[in-house]
Amino acid sequence: NAGVTQTPKFQVLKTGQSMTLQCAQDMNHEYMSWYRQDPGMGLRLIHYSVGAGITDQGEVPNGYNVSRSTTEDFPLRLLSAAPSQTSVYFCASRSLSGINEQFFGPGTRLTVL
Amino acid sequence: AQKITQTQPGMFVQEKEAVTLDCTYDTSDPSYGLFWYKQPSSGEMIFLIYQGSYDQQNATEGRYSLNFQKARKSANLVISASQLGDSAMYFCAMREGPGGGSQGNLIFGKGTKLSVKP
C-alpha cells in the first residue's frame, strides 16, 4: 500500500512554462484534493474531486486546472506558471464514508523563476 | 472571516512538560469535525486527533488530547510530557457538514510552530 504518491518532489520552472503535478492513491478513496502551502498561510485548498469525472474549485483555483478520469489519479496542471505559484503543493485523499482522516502525499516543492 | 484561528505563531516548551496549542473556529453548521495535524521539518502531514461536534467526550490519542469547548468554539490541542520529537508545526483544521464533517473540505488554520527545549 503506497498511500498517496506525488511526483516530482522538486521542480523549477520559468515564468510562462506549463507543467503537471502528478498525484495517485491506491486506497480507492472517492475524495481527492490539492492544497498549496505558503509560509505563514497554512494550507489552502486549490481544487477537489469527490469522484471520477467530478471536480470543483477550492479557495485559490486561479491558474490551476484539474481532471479526474480515474479514481486513482488527480493531476494538477499549471497552464502558464507565475512566480506567485512558487509554493509547496500537497495532494490528499480520503474516503467519503465516515469520519476518516485525510491522507496526504509527501508534497512537491515548486519554484517559478 | 477566518474559519480557523491559531493565535500562537510560535511556542516554546520544556521537555517533559505539557503544552496547549490554541485553536478557535467559526461555523454556523451544527455538524462539523475538528482535526489536528503535525508537520515536522521533513514536511509530511501527520494526522493526530479528531473531534466530532456531537462527541460528548474530549478526544484522546496517546499523549494528545483535544480540549473541546463547544460554546466557546475552541478546540485546543494538549500535548502531555513533551518530547524533542514533538518540535514541529501544528495545524488545526475543520470540516463542516453532515456526519461530523464527513462530506466537506478540510479548512486549515495558519499553524503554530512548537519548539521543545531539552
Image (spheres, grey):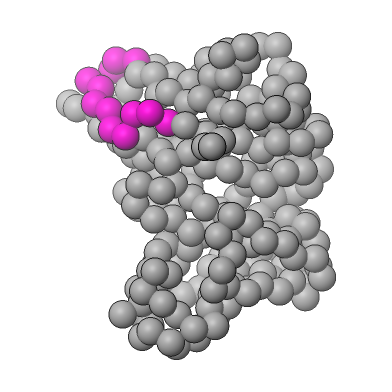
Question: Residue at left 60%, top 50%?
Answer: A103
Q: Is residue A47 left or right of residue A30?
A: left
Q: Residue furthest left?
A: B118
Would you place residue A74 above or below residue B81 in this image? Answer: below
Would you place residue A14 above or below residue A61 in this image? Answer: below
Residue B24 in view (yes/no): yes
Question: Residue at left 56%, top 68%?
Answer: A62
Horizontal and vertical percent for residue B2? 52, 37
Horizontal and vertical percent for residue B33? 67, 31
* The N terminus of chain A - image quarter: bottom right
Front-most of residues A53 and A8: A53
Horizontal and vertical percent for residue A110? 39, 71
Give the magenta range: B6-18
Q: Is residue A41 left or right of residue B49?
A: left
Was residue B91 drawn as part of the magenta stretch in this picture?
A: no
Horizontal and vertical percent for residue A7? 51, 73
Labels in figure, total: 0
Q: Residue furthest front?
A: B1
Q: Is residue A17 left or right of residue B29?
A: left
Question: Residue at left 27%, top 28%?
Answer: B11
Front-most of residues B83 and A80: A80
* The C terminus of chain A - image quarter: bottom left
Was residue B11 drawn as part of the magenta stretch in this picture?
A: yes
Q: Quadrant of residue B34?
A: top right
Q: Main secondary structure of the magenta part?
A: loop
Residue B114 in view (yes/no): no
Q: Quadrant of residue A91?
A: bottom right
